[in-house]
Image (cartoon, rainbow, N blue to C red):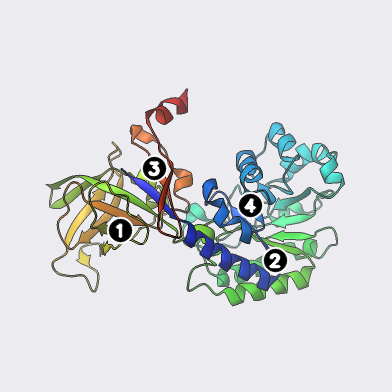
Amino acid sequence: MAAYVISLPALERNARILRETADAAGCRIVLALKGFSCWKAFDAIRPHLDGCCASGLWEGLLARDHFGKHIVTYSPGYTEDDIRQLCEFTHHLDFNSLSQWFRFREIVMAHPRFESGELLCGLRVNPQCSTGDTPLYDPCVAGSRLGITADQLEGADLTGLSGLHFHTLCEQNSDDLEKTLVAVEEKFGHLLRSPQFTYLNMGGGHWITKPFYDRERLIHLVKETRAKYDVEVWLEPGEAAAIHTGVLRSEVLDVFDSAGHKLVILDISATAHMPDVLEMPYRPDVFLVESSKGQVPSSNEEKQPAVTFEGERYVPGMEKSAILHRLGGPTCLAGDVTGDFAFPRALVPGDVLVFDDMAHYTMVKTTTFNGVKHPDIVLQHEDGTLETIREFSYPDFRDRLA
């Protein structure tokens, strides 16, 4: 049976790194639920982070009910019902446009939590500084719907606002944050220097827990920003909290040859269970696990790495004996293909493959497209024991649309 296996010790390791970095920088750091929202794993994260970042009402309710700390909420669009409910519990309520702020300003500012200072409001801004490589994930592209540009704020009545929020990064190092902060200073520095603005949210996309990430530069940038504007700084990484903490276990259903390719059908799907493989696009590491059929492999079980394949040639270091396979899912989507991977032997039905790094921005996006069975969710504890916290069945598929 297919399963996501999430390592609680790995989650705690990441959370400790985030806490240490935030403490050194003197800023606040929260978990972005859009990247990881498996709430039964929150116990490993909660002690080390300041709260959660929610992308709207439902994530906000999840943070309130299962994390219990500070809640930062931002959405490109709210309804009046969203606003009235969020005012009851969120601590930051950031708006995407002046029109949304003007539409709901009276409701928010009349709320007792706003009047007492327990609820603060801000605007997401667009510094128009693209630093990423993937347009799909770039909120600074021309015509972006995410955030307000500097020209839109000229002469605007900003009464009631006390924060600015930008989110421009995606899987990036702190040098790109440094470039972004130069643009923020140029376009919005005058607002941040005003006593009216008391917080700056630098969003997510910071790869803080990656071994190569320059945390010292991040710490310096945050300290410099706090001193320059006299504001409280917030970071809201999602991927950094859950990177390298989980795998997706799959089983080979079929292997056959066609047009010179050795095709493999798995019980998991790129489009349904790891959509970033198609959207980002993202290429996962894949391992052949030598375990008995039906056993759920843990995230540290002995694995044989697949050898990546590029175009018409093997990459340097590939064993000549490795056998190339094209891994695909069980759906009717022709493009439901994870990619070409080589293994030390030919795969056969019943083999177990493990896709690495499948906790962040994966579980939050899954579907039951084509009625494909959804993988179980399993927690791996510190002693190596595995706890299945959710098994999906036909009623989950049946009841979703009725």
Q: Position of residue 3 (x, y in %)?
A: 36, 46
In the image, 247 versus 199, the foreground residue is: 247
* Residue 210 left/right relative to 262: right
Q: Amino acid at mark 3?
A: Asp
Q: Position of residue 349 (x, y in %)?
A: 18, 46
Distance between mark 2 and mark 3 Cα atoms: 36 Å
> Which image quadrant is residue 318 in?
bottom left
Q: Amino acid at mark 1?
A: Val
Q: Are marks 3 and 4 in contact (CB under 8 Å)?
A: no
Q: Earlier in the sequence, mark 4 or mark 1?
A: 4
The residue that appears at 45% across and 25% down in the rendered structure is: 399
User: Can residue 141 be seen from the camera position used here?
Assistant: no
User: Which residue position holds label 3?
Assistant: 376
Q: Earlier in the sequence, mark 3 or mark 4?
A: 4
Q: Amino acid at mark 2?
A: Cys
Which secondary structure, mark 1? strand
The residue that appears at 48% across and 74% down in the rendered structure is: 212
Q: Position of residue 158 (x, y in %)?
A: 82, 50
Relative to 283, residue 279 above or below: above
User: Which residue position holds label 2?
Assistant: 27
User: Which residue position holds label 1?
Assistant: 286
Q: Earlier in the sequence, mark 2 or mark 3?
A: 2
